[in-house]
Image: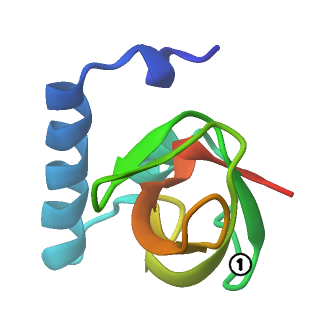
Amino acid sequence: MTDVMKWDKATVEAAIAEWYFLDAIGGDNSAGVAILSGNRPPLPLLSRVRLAHNLNTEGLNLPLGSMGTIVETLDPGIAYIVEFFQPHHCVATVYDRSLSKV
């Protein structure tokens, strides 16, 4: 397990805020992308993915291993909108570190 997985929520939110700031002023945010994505290249649109942990969204619980399809990229390598069909049909915003490619 990498150190990234051990970060608390406040640390991750601060890193994301800094990444957005650097992106907005045209700064080099490549280091932030590498840290937050775990040095994995961004997942392509329409990739089949699997949840790495339980996810509660829209009042529904999607268990570990639920499979879905990336339908939108919010920030390449950071977060995606994923459509799930089983066990519930829903759309959720999911961080890259919470997904594995099928």
Q: Quadrant of residue 11?
A: top left
Which residue is drawn at the image coordinates 49% and 79% (left, top)? 73
Q: Nearer the viewer, residue 79 or 4?
A: 79
Q: Amino acid at mark 1?
A: Pro
Q: Is residue 37 left or right of residue 6?
A: right
- In this rendering, the answer to whether 12 lies above or below 84 is above
Which residue is drawn at the image coordinates 64% and 36% (left, top)? 64
Q: Quadrant of residue 20?
A: bottom left
- In this rendering, the answer to whether 83 lies above or below 94 is below
Which residue is drawn at the image coordinates 78% and 70% (left, top)? 48
- In the picture of the structure, the residue carrying the numbered disc 1 is 44
Secondary structure at numbered mark 1: loop
Which residue is drawn at the image coordinates 22% and 28% (left, top)? 9
Q: Is residue 81 left or right of residue 23?
A: right
- In this rendering, the answer to whether 22 lies above or below 72 is above
Q: Quadrant of the C terminus?
A: bottom right
Q: Residue furthest right?
A: 102
Q: Quadrant of the N terminus?
A: top right
On the image, the x and y values in percent for residue 93 come to 39, 65
On the image, the x and y values in percent for residue 55 come to 45, 43
Query: Could you tell me if residue 75 is visible in this image?
Result: no
Q: Nearer the viewer, residue 6 or 82?
A: 82
Q: Is residue 18 left or right of residue 70?
A: left
Query: Could you tell me if residue 12 is visible in this image?
Result: yes
Q: How many marks?
A: 1
